[in-house]
């Protein structure tokens, strides 16, 4: 029986491979032929990516883009979409230029295009890679229907500093989880076949190490050892490359003293030679120009550095179009280098099918039926529900009993503007369902009490600054004290208080670093006043980063982290608050106790003087513990789960063998619920020091009350590998501890030896 199947499978593989190579040789022929016809100027034009439309995120905006397209000086544009707008520009490229080469249209489709999903940090809290893939596919479907071919996503920068506003665009602090999520995004956007009209090219960013900018200040310097890079920061970019990401975006920071956009070691040795990346490299917004500010040289010099380092496409600077021709004449850049870069961009266009149909995917009909349709909204709600993370729930105050009198307090209760979060691209906040809208829909009007209680922030200057990029904060004409008094009066009428607080969307994201990550002081004052009522208080948070919540943790009964949960945020939060859905999210970034503890992350290294309360000369603070407030992997449920001891198939792993570790997970509570089972491994002794533990597996398991399930992990030797001091990827013999449980603090432990 087996043979015919095997035969069929191998024939199929052969046919597919033949198709692939045939396809490739057709593409090669096509591109060779095109390149032969191109002037050097035209080739350089293909390396130019210009913004047109809106959304300026840097110091420069291009002018006369339409004319430049006609002149053959543009390879792609970004920040414009809709079938009409795209058609108009594409027509110029294919009708009015000499060689009729179509443009690529890019955009920051970061967590949805028009249907907005939770911010990526929230998405990562689902630990649900299939769900993330489905969201990316849905985003690609909408974006491609709107004329786009390319998204600047996923951002896979490892982040350990919640002062950095862009942590909201990340998948958190862990390289293993980050790699799985990176792959899910790429698979979802590209589906392994860019010729499909509903796919878009993805772009892994920001290569590399952008998440480690000093002091959490955006665009700041990075300095890091190779060992840390390879083991802790590079894996998600590498994972994206291995799964076939089409493009890579450079980062703003320097690496070993050389800005990423001019760093040959990074872009050629590592990315091309070691990782075999075959797509194209684009810079971040005006990053080549910014190399002058870094002190790398003048305009000509940084252009030379950048192209010779391995950049293929210049986003916004227009330095390539200005400088490359003379650099070739001076012999500083080889024409062949331009050919290689241009070929990569033409290949991307070919793979997208743009030469066959420059209007790929464009149809008003598709845009009408695919964008914000029922399925997309249901998916957005599913993602929001699964991202919401219950941080604390004393006395099971949640879920709420709708027959009780409940006061909802806070400016964010009725807010739509902030729900879609930062980088919500083409999403319109007016499509978002606020919590109040969802409550009224479910329970009717006037069922609950409401009071505003405070502005998001009282700082007039800061709110004016934030509002420059779209109103997100309104300062009430009533004084802060008046607002608090009214809220307390309202709260006094209720049995339970739900305070909905946090950040405005612009308080996290790009160029939104904060040096103090507590709730704004006026919100803290409100919470303190609500606490004095003696009524139970639930804190519902909307924000884009881990906050420092020590006081809140000590004083508030329940804390529900909802991130910026997207278009269906309100419905998802209401379902969780009233128990229609059971929270299952787990945080992917540690929440510090205070800002001074940063960076605090779970997979730290031991010191020679480990913490001890009773000894003075150990590694600790005088005024705060070493532990974060909420650990990586933490998140509660309305039910409880118990874990059996770990069963190992063997206590010895032979070279290239593997062992199976299993636990029995039981839902011991009264509600159906999903648990994220996490596997951590600690390498006890290494040729270089090893982290206290590292995530090496996870599974999401749904259980009915009383139900049990055996959960298995296969531990391969690959999972034990790390980069040693010679940057060789090795597993070293010796003892390993493994932990399986519901968070990174689990002490459910076993051990084995690698021989
Ligand atoms: C950001 C990128 C983004 C680009 C294009 C830059 O400022 O760093 O993440 O993709 O702008 O909008």
Image: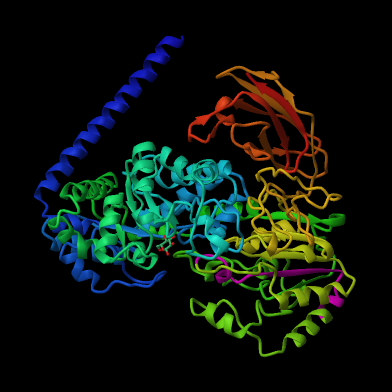
Q: Is residue 499 magenta?
A: yes
Q: Position of residue 141 (x, y in %)?
A: 41, 52
Foreground residue, 197 or 300?
A: 300
The C terminus - image quarter: top right
When the figure is inspected, residue 188 is found, relative to residue 710, above or below; the finding is below
- The residue stretch that appears in magenta: 490-510
Judged from this view, the residue extending furthest toward the front is 617
When the figure is inspected, residue 348 is found, relative to residue 657, above or below; the finding is below
Residue at coordinates 55% horizontally, 31% vertically from top-left?
721
Left or right: where does residue 173 sit relative to residue 291?
Answer: right
For ligand 1, which image quadrant applies? Answer: bottom left
When the figure is inspected, residue 342 is found, relative to residue 293, above or below; the finding is above
Residue at coordinates 66% horizontally, 86% vertically from top-left?
476
Left or right: where does residue 719 sit relative to residue 666?
Answer: left
Q: Classify residue 129 by image quadrant.
A: top right
Foreground residue, 523 or 624?
A: 624
Q: Position of residue 242 (x, y in %)?
A: 42, 37
Does any portion of residue 452 appear in the rendered image?
A: yes
Foreground residue, 706 or 281?
A: 281
Q: Is residue 107 magenta?
A: no
């Amino acid at each position: 029986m087996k043979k015919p199947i095997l035969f069929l499978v191998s024939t199929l593989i052969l046919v597919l491979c033949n198709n692939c190579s045939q396809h490739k040789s057709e593409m090669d022929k096509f591109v060779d032929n095109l390149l032969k016809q191109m002037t050097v100027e035209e080739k350089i034009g293909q390396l130019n990516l210009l913004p047109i439309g809106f959304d300026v995120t840097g110091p420069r905006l291009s002018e006369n883009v339409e004319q430049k397209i006609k002149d053959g000086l543009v390879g792609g544009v970004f920040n414009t979409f809709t079938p009409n707008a795209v058609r108009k520009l594409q027509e110029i490229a294919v009708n009015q230029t000499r060689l009729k080469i179509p443009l690529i249209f890019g955009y920051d489709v970061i967590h949805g295009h028009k249907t907005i999903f939770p911010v990526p940090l929230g998405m990562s809290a689902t630990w649900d890679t299939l769900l993330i893939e489905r969201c990316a596919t849905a985003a690609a479907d909408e974006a491609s229907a709107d004329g786009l071919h390319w998204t600047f996503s996923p951002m896979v920068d490892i982040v350990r500093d919640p002062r950095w506003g862009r942590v909201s665009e990340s998948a958190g602090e862990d390289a293993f989880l980050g790699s799985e999520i990176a792959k899910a995004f790429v698979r979802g956007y590209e589906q392994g076949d860019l010729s499909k009209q509903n796919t878009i090219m993805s772009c892994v960013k920001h290569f590399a190490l952008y998440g480690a900018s000093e002091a959490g200040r955006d665009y700041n310097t990075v300095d890091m050892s190779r060992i840390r890079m390879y083991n802790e920061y590079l894996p998600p970019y590498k994972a994206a490359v291995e799964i076939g990401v089409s493009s890579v975006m450079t980062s703003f920071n320097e690496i070993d003293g050389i800005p990423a956009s001019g760093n040959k070691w990074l872009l050629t040795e590592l990315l091309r030679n070691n990782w075999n990346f075959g797509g194209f490299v684009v810079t971040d917004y005006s990053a080549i120009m910014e190399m002058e500010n870094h002190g790398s040289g003048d305009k000509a010099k940084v252009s030379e550095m950048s192209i010779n380092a391995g950049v293929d496409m210049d986003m916004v600077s227009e330095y390539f179009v200005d400088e490359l021709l003379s650099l070739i004449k001076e012999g500083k850049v080889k024409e062949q280098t331009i050919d290689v870069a241009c070929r990569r961009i033409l290949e991307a266009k070919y793979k997208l099918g743009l030469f066959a149909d420059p209007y790929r995917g464009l149809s008003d009909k598709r845009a009408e039926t695919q964008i914000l349709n029922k399925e997309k909204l249901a998916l957005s709600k599913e993602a929001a529900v699964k991202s919401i993370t219950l941080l604390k729930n004393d006395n099971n105050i949640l879920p709420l009993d709708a027959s009780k009198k409940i006061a909802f307090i806070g400016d964010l209760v009725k807010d739509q503007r902030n729900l879609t979060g930062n980088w919500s691209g083409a999403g319109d906040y007016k499509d978002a369902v606020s919590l109040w809208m969802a409550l009224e829909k479910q329970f009717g009007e006037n069922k609950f009490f409401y009071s505003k209680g405070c502005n998001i922030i009282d700082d007039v200057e800061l709110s004016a600054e934030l509002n420059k990029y779209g109103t997100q904060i309104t300062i009430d004409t009533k004084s802060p004290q008046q607002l608090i008094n009214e809220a307390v009066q309202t709260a006094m009428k209720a049995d339970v208080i739900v305070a909905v607080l946090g950040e405005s969307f612009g308080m996290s994201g790009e160029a939104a670093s904060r040096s103090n990550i507590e709730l704004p002081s006026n919100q803290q004052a409100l919470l303190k006043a609500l606490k004095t009522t003696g009524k139970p208080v639930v804190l519902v948070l909307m924000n884009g980063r881990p906050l420092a919540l020590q006081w809140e943790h000590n004083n508030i009964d329940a804390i529900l982290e909802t991130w910026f949960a997207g278009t269906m945020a309100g419905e998802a939060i209401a379902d969780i608050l009233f128990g229609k859905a059971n929270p299952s999210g787990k945080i992917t970034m540690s929440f510090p106790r205070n800002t001074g503890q940063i960076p605090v992350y779970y997979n730290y290294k031991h010191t020679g003087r480990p913490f001890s309360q009773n000894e003075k000369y150990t590694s600790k603070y005088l005024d705060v513990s070493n532990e974060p407030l909420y650990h990586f992997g933490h998140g509660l449920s309305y039910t409880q789960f118990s874990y059996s001891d770990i069963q190992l198939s063997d206590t010895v792993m032979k070279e290239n063998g593997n062992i199976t570790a299993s636990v029995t997970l039981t839902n011991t509570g009264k509600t159906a619920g999903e648990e994220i089972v996490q596997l951590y491994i600690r390498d006890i002794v290494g040729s270089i020091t090893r982290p206290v533990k590292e995530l090496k597996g996870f599974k999401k398991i749904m259980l009915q009350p009383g139900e049990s399930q055996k959960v298995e992990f296969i531990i391969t030797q690959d999972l034990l590998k790390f980069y040693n001091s010679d940057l060789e990827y090795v597993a070293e013999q010796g003892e390993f501890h493994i932990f399986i449980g519901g968070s990174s603090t689990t002490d459910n432990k076993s051990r084995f030896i690698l021989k």
